Image: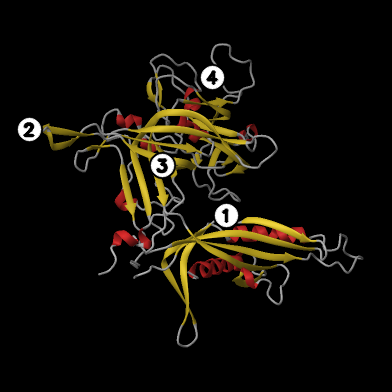
Amino acid sequence: MALSKSLTQPLRKNMLFVGSGWRGFFAPFDYQAALTSTTGGPNILDLERQGPFNTNALPAGYSDLGWIKNFKFTNNTKVGQVRSGYRGIVRAQYRGEVGEQCEFQFREFGRQQYKVATGCQMYNLLSSSGTPSTTSPLGSPGSFAAIVMGASGYVASGAVAGQVGKPTLYVPSGSGAAFAVNNYVVVDIDYVAGTSGVLGEAGAFAYPNAITDTDWIRKTSDYVARVTAIVTGVGSPVQDALILDQVFVGGGSPAATNGIPPTTSKVQIVSGWSARNGGTFIQEWSGLFISDAQDGAQIALYYPHLSISQFRGMNPYTIENIGTTDTTGNELDASFECLGFDDPLDGETVCSYMGYFPNANNTQNVY
Amino acid sequence: MIESTDTLWNYFTGRIATINPARLLGGYLDAQDWPPKQVDFDKFYMLVLGDVPLDEETFSWNVPFYETTVQFMWMNMGTQISNYTNVMGKNRGDRIRTCYQMKQELLQAMFPGFTNKISLSVDAAQNLQTTTLQEQIWWSKPAFNTRVDRESGLLYGTATVKIGSMAPTIAA
């Protein structure tokens, strides 16, 4: 008789899952749609038709928020028990509370990482050179009046000579002089006095009669990018083109305008961002976390509705052997709550999907 | 077990052929066979230092996991300047630049730290056959070191890399 398998632990080499950790991708949650439906709101991914996911060509609306460390998910679903009889034996089990949390650290530090990790209402800090406000840390208008977007608007993949394929933002002819290379710009509509509720493409929340700042939607907008080049006198009608470093990410409320500023949008320069701790609003997302195995298999964790549970702050990590003093990096550390989603497939309320895609070329069973 | 070193050398030489097709490649040998009769300058060699089993977390007697340590090796003499009319500089003073260029090439060639394992064999007609196996090898970040031989003025460069790999399955 052959030796027992438990003594020699045979394994199928092609069924190990060896990779290099996880990567996080986020899409805006459509707050407008969620107001009227328990199935509306998430950026739905089709695991059957879109998986395994290509991390170099993401599904529409999803953006790569970069290198994440120590990704961990915790299933908080409780299983209850029905005991009966003299001995109180378990006769049946039922699924009680349903829930899941995930946590990780963002190694890369940018606006969207900052926004997702803090969960706060983010504010773009408009470049402003006037007298500082004495009433609100975020209350100053931009240093120049917002410039109306050009007739050709925003093009995610532009056609300006020498800049073909790059995100391009058109402004009226002559307006390009108001900007400089490496400026960050925000593009969105004016706030209309008297409006309230979920406003703007980023779905910021406004109380009735609480806001008077015309720039408020641009201050809360996700449509921010860095200018890498300015090309004057292009297109028809003749306009100036601001070439951007990346396509606009975020937006998504409503989903139909995901990533595209409305035609009446205006442009302003941004000097930085503020995550204001407090307030009412909590940011929500659809999240996709991917771990690829070296042999081509993939595990994809999809959270249709994800929101911040706790922002643990900026954690320092040591960068070894650089300099003579302590040199540290800083990462944004956060945990997230997976909110419920009513799956129209069968009406069940769930909070996450775990997809496993084996290596399609793995035809040889080596065991 | 030799599949892991065969695979790494095959992968490395394939990458170098793209990164710098002019780079000389000397082949790989057991560390105790070093140096060969003739050592050429600015040429990559790979020395195999040994194999140790991985810890209990990953070791199976049926499919043993081993870590093989290899050391890439090269020597730089620098450029001999014989014509000081047209060339200014310290004779053979550029050897550190050549050494760093080779380090960069090696680092680039090691990307991304894993590849499919291959098995080499010779068929009846004495042709080399390459079989791609359904498993990977993976390797560590290269750790570089250099040493100068003061007598000869030669610069020795090394890069130590550890390969993780599963040995062939032991059926019985």
Label 1 and label 2 in one chain = no
Q: Secondary structure at mark 1?
A: loop
Q: Earlier in the sequence, mark 3 or mark 2?
A: 3
* Mark toward the start of the polypeptide (4 vs 2): 2
Can residue A264 be seen by looking at this rendering? Answer: no
Is the image coloured rainbow, by chain, by secondary structure, or in one colour?
Answer: secondary structure
Mark 4 or mark 3: which comes first in sequence?
3
Relative to A198, residue B8 above or below: below
From the viewer's perspective, is the residue at label 4 or at label 2 nearer?
2
Q: Nearer the viewer, residue B65 or A266?
A: B65
User: Quarter holding the N terminus of chain A?
Assistant: bottom left
**Of the residues shown, which amino acid type is indicated by label 1?**
Lys
Q: Nearer the viewer, mark 3 or mark 2?
A: 2
- Chain of residue at mark 1: B
The amino acid type of the residue labelled 3 equals Gly
Quarter of the image where one finds residue A116:
top left
The image shows residue A107, relative to residue B166, as above or below, that is above
- Identify the residue at horizontal 50%, vertical 70% (top origin): B2
